[in-house]
Each structure stands twice: as structure tokens, then as C-alpha cells.
Image: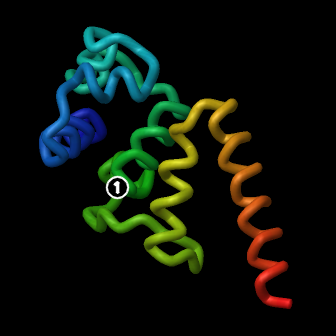
Amino acid sequence: MALYRRIRELREDYDKKQSEIADYLQTTAQYYGKYESGEREIPFSRAIMLADYYDVSLDYLANRTNDSSNVHYGFTDDECKVASLYRILSERNKGKVELFIEQLLRHQSKNNK
């Protein structure tokens, strides 16, 4: 049951409503509320989404540690922020971001010559 208490605490710490988190998870507020109360098991894919959203580890969500820091594998905080924002984009918008980055790199390459 610790997992359910922890996701509620995180949501409250971030001043979010159940409906906001439910939207992010692409479910209903009622269904999400059942995750927080322990009435429903959280699918692993949604647990990952929550860990990404709150920038915590799955171990923290599962109450296996009290260290809320997420391992970033050598990425800077800015790089992690960009990756987190990228994850919540639609597939179409992810494609737009990738094209924009390619354009920026070409422009940068021309300016460095």
C-alpha cells in the first residue's frame, strides 16, 4: 500500500488535482483515484509515467527507498528536463521537435565553418 500513499503525497506536493494526473496518464480521475486508494493496481507502464512526471525513481514510488532523486545517467538537469518534456509530447509534435533540432544542428554547423 505504500505505493498508493506515495503517489498521493507526490501529487499533493506538486499541487496537482487527480484529474490533472489522470489526464497525463490518459485515464479518468475516478480510475486514477482508485490507484491512490489502492483499489486498483497501477500498471507498470503508468508507474513509469508517474516516475518520469515527478522525476523520481520507481524504487521511490514503490517505497523501496526514501531517496527521491532519480538517476540521470550522466545527463545534466537541463538535458533531463528536455527529455521529460519530450516524453509527454504527441508523436506528431515529437517529429516536429526532431526536425527543428536537425535544422538547428545544420545552422550551427554552417556557422562554425
Q: Is residue 100 left or right of residue 66?
A: right
Quadrant assignment for the N terminus: top left
Q: Is residue 22 above or below residue 48?
A: above
- Residue visible at 56% across and 48% down in the picture: 86
Would residue 74 appear left or right of 40 to someone viewing this image? right
Q: Residues within 10 Å of mark 1 (few under 14, many from 20)?
A: some
State the residue lying farthest toward the bottom: 113
Residue behind mark 1: 60
Question: In this view of the protein, which residue sits in the foreground, 6 or 70?
Answer: 70
Q: Is residue 20 left or right of residue 15?
A: right
Element carrying mark 1: helix
Q: How is the image coloured?
A: rainbow
Nearer to me, 91 or 57: 91
Q: Amino acid at mark 1?
A: Tyr
In the figure, residue 53 lies in which quadrant? Answer: top left
Q: Position of residue 94 (x, y in %)?
A: 66, 41
- Placement of the C terminus among the 4 image quadrants: bottom right
Q: Residue at x 26, y 9 (%)?
A: 30
Q: Is residue 42 above or below residue 102?
A: above
Q: Residue at x 42, y 57 (%)?
A: 57
Q: Nearer the viewer, residue 53 or 39?
A: 53
Q: Is residue 102 above or below residue 4?
A: below
Q: Residue at x 76, y 49 (%)?
A: 99
Residue 9, by quadrant, is: top left
Residue 87 in the image: state x and y as whole percent.
56, 44
